[in-house]
Structure formats: C-alpha cells, structure tokens
Amino acid sequence: MSSKPQNQAPFNIVVIGQDGRLMYEALLFAASLRAMDPNFKGRLFIAEPQPGEMWQNDPRMKQADVLSAFKRLGAEILPFESRHFGQSYPYGNKIEALLALPEGEPFVFFDSDTLITGPVSSVPFDFTRPCASQKVEGTWPQIELYGPGYTEIWKSLYDRFGLEFESTLDLDQPDEYWKRYLYFNAGFFFYECPRKFGERFLEYALEIRDNPPEAASLQVFDPWLDQVALPLVIHSFGGARRTIPEDTLDGAISCHYRTFPLLFARENDRVVEVLREVSSPNWIKKALKDYEPIKRLVYQPKGDKIRAMFDRDHLPRREKMIRNQIKKAGLWMR
C-alpha cells in the first residue's frame, strides 16, 4: 500500500494557546506534529485570545522560550478577539478562533491537550462532511426524574434551528440511552471553511446559552455548551457520526490525553514514547521546564509511578476512579 497522503490539497491545523497550561500543551502539540508528520504541508496556527473586557488578565503568551520554540517549529501565532465568551467560558475560544482563520481554506481543529502520534496528512478527510471526536461520555443532558427525556430535549434543539432530527439517531442503541443521540467531544472537528463553521457554531451556541428551548431550559450548559451545539452544527453541514476511518484520529494518529496524569495512567506505550521523544530536545526542555506536570512526570520522571499503578488492559470503568487513585498517591496535577 502506498504511504502517499490521500489528501492532495493542503489543509490548516489550529489549536488554542494562551498564557498558562494551554501554551505548554500547544507547544507539545506542535512538536509532536512536526516529529510525527514531517510532510504536513498546511499551516499550523496557535490561536491566541487577545486582552479585552472579556478577560480579567492578559491571556497572551509571554514566555520568550515558548514563543521562540513555536517559531522554530514553524507555528504561526494567530490573534483573535473574544467578543462573546472569554474568561467566563474559555471553551468558547475554539468557536471564536475559527473566525480568524483563513476563509475558504479547509481546517482541522484540535484541543491543545492532544498529541499527534502519526501522519495527520494521511487521514482521508472529506472536508465537505464534518465529524468530531467520539471519545466522549454521556455528560449531557442530565435527565431529571420527572423532566423531559433525551429525545424531547435533543429534538427541541434541532427544531429550534430548523434541522431534521430523525436521521441523527443511532437506531442500534436503545431509546432514551445517550449513545442513540448525536453527541461529540469537541477535541477535534473539521470542515472546508472555518468562517462558515465558526459563524454557525457561534450562532447556535449563543442561542442555546441565551434562549434555550423550554425542554432544555433547566439543563446546565457550562461547561457543555460547545458539545451541545457541535452536533447541531455538524448535522447542519451534512456531516455524520464518523466520516473518517476508525483508528485514525483518537487512534493511531492522535491522542486527546486531557491531563498528563491520565496520559500516564491509561494511554498506550506509543503515546508515552511520543511524549518523551518530543519533550527531550534541550530547546524544548528550556521552554517546558517551568511547567510542573511535565517537569515532575516526564523529566523526573514520576509518570512511571502512575503508569505502574494501572493495568491498561483492565482500567477502572470510570475516570473518576482513576483520578482518585492518582490523587491518593499524591501525583495528581494539571
């Protein structure tokens, strides 16, 4: 089989970077992309929120070693304005950043807490048919005993935006079970135009937040707002549950690890190898040395202690149990 990438046209990649944890995660993302996909031909954007009334402090990245490392990795800092979310809902960064990307150029968004573990340029994206991460738990909606059920809540949202509902259901799943309904993690998503996707994402998210339909009015949207709006946006653009092959993103090509303690606890050996490899050059170490989780878990390396605590073939069923075990050992950090 030829290893030639199936995407003939280049596409852009974007992650969020801002002062604090996200800038270190974004740096590791950039380093892993360059190491694992040296043939990537698109542009890599680190989208950076700008100071303004939506932020209490200046969110821009100021550490010289980090900025220098981004430059060396060929990553472009992309400033964007926070007009609707900012400090009160930082997950909104991924919505507002899309509006600053080059219009009409295909893009893939990744959460910053992701490592690239294989060639992204080999993924056969159909940018006209978006999808998003299915590495998700049934976090929303929270069903009340005498309140509306999943079908009534989700259908009310599709109805609000004039979208057809029935074709989004996975009829292999039981009625009123969360997996029957289109629900994604926003850890990655893609489309042919960031402006179109971003404008609709913003429109839907603001409407849901400010004027939810009655069936959803008692639901909590923080922090789930982006994940509630995302399936509606994807469906509106003709997307589906999965439009890329399995074992690509969230598989052999990328890992959305979420936190470094969780990475050491549950991800496979390949992910740990990539993390160690891309964080090892001295110029990367110089930029990461002040970031406690990497300093302690990778460079010391206490991550090995976390790794030894768990059998990855028989992990606790709930993430909370993994977190509690790490906390009990005094090794939880973020």
Image (cartoon, rainbow, N blue to C red):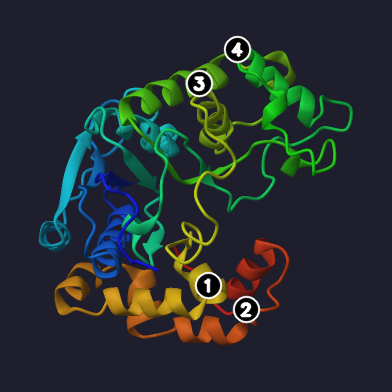
- Check disc 3 and report its element: helix, strand or loop: helix
At label 3, which amino acid type do we have?
Tyr
- Amino acid type assigned to the residue bearing label 1 in the image: Glu
Question: Contact, CB < 8 Å: mark 1 with mark 4?
Answer: no
> In the image, which is nearer the foreground, mark 1 or mark 4?
4
For the question of whether residue 54 can be seen, the reply is no
- Residue flagged by tag 4: what amino acid is it? Gly
Q: Who's the residue at 35% across and 58% down the image?
A: 122
254 versus 103 height, above or below: below
Q: First in sequence: mark 2 or mark 1?
A: 1
Contact flag, marks 2 and 1 (Cβ < 8 Å): yes
- Which residue in the structure is indicated by mark 4? 162
Q: Where is residue 110 in the image (x, y as percent from the top left)?
A: 39, 49
SS at badge 2: loop
- Mark 3 → mark 2, Cα distance in angstroms: 39 Å
Position of 249 relative to 77 (above/below): below
Q: Of circles 4 and 2, which is in front?
A: 4
114, 122: nearer the viewer: 122
Tell me which numbered mark, 1 or 3, is placed earlier along the sequence.
3
Q: Which residue carries the number 3 mark?
A: 204
- Measured as percent of width and height from the top left, residue 279 is found at 28, 74
Q: Which residue is the site of mark 2?
A: 312
Cα distance, mark 1 to mark 4? 40 Å
Residue extending farthest to the right is 146
Q: Nearer the viewer, mark 4 or mark 3?
A: 4
